[in-house]
Image (cartoon, coloured by chain):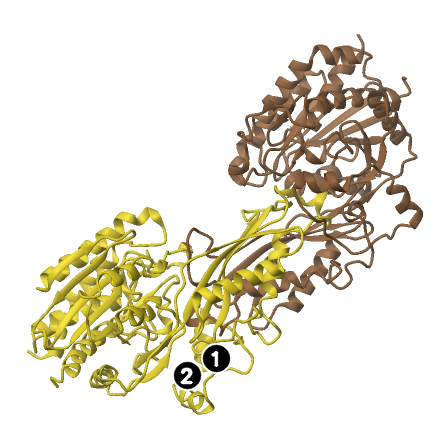
Chain colours: A yellow, B brown
Amino acid sequence: MEIKSYIENNKKKFLDELFELIRIPSISAIKDYDKELRKAATFLKNQFDDLGLENCEICETEGYPIVYAEKIKDENLPTVLVYGHYDVQPVDPIDLWDSKPFEPIIKKTKIHPEGAIFARGSCDDKGQMFMHLKAIEVLKNTTGIPCNIKFMIEGEEEVGSDNLEEFVRNNKEKLDCDIILVSDTGMIDKNTPSITTGLRGLSYLEVELTGPNRDLHSGLYGGSVANPINSLAKMISSLHDENNKVTIPGFYDKVINYSDEQRKEDDLIPFSINEFKNSIDIDEVHGEESYSTQERRSIRPCLDVNGIWGGYTDEGSKTVIPSKAFAKISMRLVSNQNSKEISQLFIDHMKNITPAGMKIKINEHHGGEPYITSTNSHAYLAASQAYESVFNKKPFAVKDGGSIPIIAQFEKILGVKTILMGFGLDSDAIHSPNEHFGVSNFYNGIETISNFYNFYSNKI
Amino acid sequence: MEIKSYIENNKKKFLDELFELIRIPSISAIKDYDKELRKAATFLKNQFDDLGLENCEICETEGYPIVYAEKIKDENLPTVLVYGHYDVQPVDPIDLWDSKPFEPIIKKTKIHPEGAIFARGSCDDKGQMFMHLKAIEVLKNTTGIPCNIKFMIEGEEEVGSDNLEEFVRNNKEKLDCDIILVSDTGMIDKNTPSITTGLRGLSYLEVELTGPNRDLHSGLYGGSVANPINSLAKMISSLHDENNKVTIPGFYDKVINYSDEQRKEDDLIPFSINEFKNSIDIDEVHGEESYSTQERRSIRPCLDVNGIWGGYTDEGSKTVIPSKAFAKISMRLVSNQNSKEISQLFIDHMKNITPAGMKIKINEHHGGEPYITSTNSHAYLAASQAYESVFNKKPFAVKDGGSIPIIAQFEKILGVKTILMGFGLDSDAIHSPNEHFGVSNFYNGIETISNFYNFYSNKI
């Protein structure tokens, strides 16, 4: 049977299976969901068993387990390692969801008139990761699996992949491969495919600023002691200059500056500033002086406050000067910035600018290194052909603003590059309320991935 | 019997009764406590009945009721109106309390070796207000009540006394009096009495800043859209200049500037900057250039953020650019600033400095006008004598940094000045965890107030 027909005949089955996985609320950031993460891992192991893969295993780590499976056809054939994750982001603010985050439903949207799956994880990464399992099923029932395949699906990507690196280090032989394949990125639009050739790195820190040793009455003390919220606001404000450049000394020292030629080429990638603004309902874009919006979110580093809190935040009013104020602050990094170095620069700088009378404590959350890869490799060209075979368009090579920290680690430990074949859209609202994934993206993804194996193994 | 002896003989009874009142968690800021506020009002009405007062009444308002009671001895005698409040501040952060906020216990402290009552409301204002009820009991059983007395105890002081003003307007005749007496302020220290002759006003607003229409992935969007938290931090930061002056245009226009003579006189009021710093564990004070710490918290206006929130504030990390960021911001005002005017200046200025691409919404919480009074009135001199009779020291006249917005309204509506006879200490931690009130302050307060009536009525 042909690949296209098999997918056509199994559309409902594929969706039903994905829904089963999505219904497991595997939120890795919140400890209460421990059991759900294990349930998701077991679901995957059962799927791998059903697909006839071998050595299917739930590998325990100090955190959530990594699910491994493989199909070794012939040691002389090339080997593809598929990486993905079964954990998802938290769902808050829950009241902004139009449906239950873990009860997937299909709804039509402007962009997806044929319907999109609305649920946490529908795109990131359950939907995208599950396409790879289904591509194996497709190949098995059509052209046959043309090369060796390994799967490594983790449960801690959304909290920094803390235990994956050690797992990879300890299992170099088991994970030996020629190329790594990942679907956790996006396309330009539903009909314009792209392959991600760059990822940003990440430094993520939490700041606690302490002023007085207790909350104070803002009448009796107001005006005479430094207020930690005002002070933290001032510190945060000073982290960008009037050109929206990050002011941390040394922050830009290792940033790669692209040539005018390269910048011009990147400028050919389709992008509508109006659609961008409309999609998130803003009047004006904002960012580092003398760079385009696309550059600001791909080849330039940045700093954002991801969360802030302090004082009285309940209904009504309380006249208090709080003892403490807090912020979660992250920086997206580009080559050749180093996450540890940048975190240290941040810590040193924040300590330097802490006002007299205040104490600061800074904790590091997970970080990750930036990544870039070329467009000339055999695997890249196979991926490009695979997209073209389904979308009738050559994919663009784009640099993505997000981070998949483990990709840089894979290269460092295994010496292997990764091909990032993404099928999500910017409008999918990953990490946000009402995350969704187009059903046609899902089916086209399965077909593209199936074709990739045949191109990569020179079977087409 | 003598006043002193009666108090001595009834110490335990007075405390037990106060404890009963404190155990009612009458938090006016949080709607769930509705029943508790009514319970506190009923407790007071029963007390007034037991004291033999007349026309004791729970007067309904659109919010929480006002408890009224009176004793008219003779229409030719002067009339004192006692004002206080039975509502209390919220208790959060609850985990910083060493004991249950609504289970009063006596603990010894450095400042109160004879013990202090630890509980929410122990000082503000249940402890201080209840002294007035007990002073009536004392007078009744000793020298007799020497003048007419009226009580008006409200349940919405901590949320802006929204319904008290209308009540006063509608009951001018009922509330007709010669002087108003209030204990909701402090003394300089346990052995150094003071009478408050100035109060700051208050403008309190809540700001909601909206950027993108939904929470965004900080990787895919970071660097290319304005982040509402960073923008709010910048706006807040800009509200003070390098001399810690508030930058809102017109903010200082109506502030009374005191003469050097007056400032020198105020400088005689005992104040230890080291004790101040040690008591709240800060290395440095902070505030408006060219004013002393005491001036910054009494005769100068100020601006503080009382609460801030936005983005991900739970455990761990979430890589999000939030759609919205919020802050509760209040300003303390001094004569002749006007709360409505200052709120409007704040709103106009915040709108002016809202960055492109952001939308701002500002709601007003309660406000209040500043208040000043003279030290030459008959009532002030009677209060001064009363303090001297108990503490053997003439009280200082001090301007207080806090706000009791209704005091200015009393003057406006009833044409009557207020004497602020406070017995709390700065270290009492009102509005904070572990609020407390010295038991000796409580007993000395009852005695001082009892004596006040006799001095005021020329009976001593």
User: Could you tell whether B66 is left or right of A133 in the image?
Assistant: right
Q: Quadrant of the N terminus of chain B?
A: top right
Q: Nearer the viewer, mark 2 or mark 1?
A: 1
Report how far apart the C-alphas of labels 2 and 1 lie in the structure. Answer: 9 Å
Q: To which residue does mark 2 refer?
A: A271
The answer to which image quadrant residue A54 occupies is: bottom left
Q: Secondary structure at mark 2?
A: loop
Q: Secondary structure at mark 1?
A: helix
A139, above or below B210, in the image: below
B218, above or below A299, in the image: above
Q: Chain of mark 2?
A: A
Please give the count of numbered marks on the rendered protein: 2
Q: To which residue does mark 1 refer?
A: A293
- Indicate the position of residue A293 as horizontal and vertical percent values: 48, 79
Compare marks 2 and 1 and give the one earlier in the sequence: 2
Residue at point 90% right, 36% down?
Answer: B375
Q: Is residue A319 visible?
A: yes
Amino acid type at circle 1 is Thr
Asked if disc 2 and disc 1 are in contact, CB closer than 8 Å, the reply is yes
Residue at point 45% right, 75% down?
Answer: A297
Q: Within 10 angstroms of label 2, few (less than 14), some, or many (20 or more) residues?
A: few
Amino acid type at circle 2 is Phe
The answer to which image quadrant residue A241 occupies is: bottom right
- Indicate the position of residue B145 as horizontal and vertical percent values: 81, 16
The answer to which image quadrant residue B358 occupies is: bottom right
Residue furthest to the bottom in view is A261
**Viewer-proximal residue, A367 or B442?**
A367
User: Could you tell whether A343 is left or right of B195 in the image?
Assistant: left
Q: Is residue B209 visible?
A: no
- Indicate the position of residue A233 as horizontal and vertical percent values: 60, 59
Label annotation for residue A156: none
- Indicate the position of residue A52 as horizontal and vertical percent values: 8, 64
